[in-house]
């Protein structure tokens, strides 16, 4: 498996992997192809260095987007905001999500961030368990989203 920075050429792979990864979690996902493409472009523009793809034999199997330009309204400082992390269902539980998250957190540390922040769907129990296992702590709730943080 290789983790590398996303390029503009990864747009179609992102749309495909995003759509497949959010099956069953549509409550928390963008649904239209046009909006997902716009989301990719937004993530790419926010912090290109923290936007990464995991590939196996040249096939994209997961993505992470860590935005170190994000200013947390709760912390009133720049944090490593994990806007997105997902892995194709058939590639889960192989350590890919862990490696993507580790790469994102390492990037945040390199950029001088002392806190990572993310939001996870309140009923996305698998993801919440994953983050808790990576030392994230619940830090509040807003609507259907749970805020989680980790000291870096």
Image (cartoon, grey):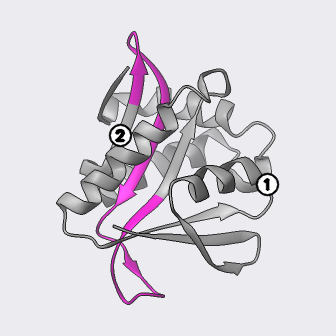
Q: Nearer the viewer, mark 1 or mark 2?
A: 2
Of the numbered discs in the image, which one, if any, rests on residue 52? 2
Residue at 58% across / 43% down in the picture?
A: 34
Residue at 79% across / 54% down in the picture?
A: 27
Indicate which disc, 1 or 2, sits on the residue closer to the N terminus.
1
Q: Is residue 62 magenta?
A: yes
Q: Position of residue 14 (x, y in %)?
A: 49, 33
How many marks overall?
A: 2
Viewer-nearest residue: 29 or 33 = 29
Q: Quadrant of the C terminus?
A: bottom left
Q: Is residue 51 magenta?
A: no
Viewer-nearest residue: 108 or 84 = 108
Of the numbered discs in the image, which one, if any, rests on residue 45? none
Q: Position of residue 125 (x, y in %)?
A: 76, 53
> SS of the residue at dot 1?
helix
Q: Residues within 10 Å of mark 2 (few under 14, many from 20)?
A: many
Give the residues drawn in magenta, as a range: 54-82
Q: Which residue is mark 1?
A: 27
| Left or right: 40 in relation to 91 | left
| Left or right: 133 in relation to 96 | right
> SS of the residue at dot 2?
strand
Place residue 81 in its image quadrant: bottom left
Q: Position of residue 53 (x, y in %)?
A: 39, 33
| Left or right: 12 in relation to 49 | right
């Amino acid at each position: 498996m290789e983790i590398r920075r996303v390029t503009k050429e990864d747009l179609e792979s992102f749309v495909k992997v995003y759509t497949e990864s959010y099956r069953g979690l549509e409550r928390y996902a963008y649904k239209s192809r046009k909006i997902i493409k716009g989301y990719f472009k937004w993530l790419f523009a926010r912090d290109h260095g923290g936007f990464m793809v995991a590939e196996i034999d040249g096939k994209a199997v997961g993505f992470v987007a860590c935005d170190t330009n994000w200013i947390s309204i709760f912390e009133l400082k720049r944090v490593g905001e994990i806007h997105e992390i997902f892995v194709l269902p058939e590639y889960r539980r192989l350590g890919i999500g862990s490696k993507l998250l580790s790469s994102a957190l390492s990037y945040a540390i390199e950029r001088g961030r002392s806190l990572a922040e993310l939001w996870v769907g309140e009923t996305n129990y698998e993801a919440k368990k994953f983050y808790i296992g990576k030392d994230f702590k619940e830090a509040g709730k807003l609507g259907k989203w749970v805020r989680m943080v980790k000291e870096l």
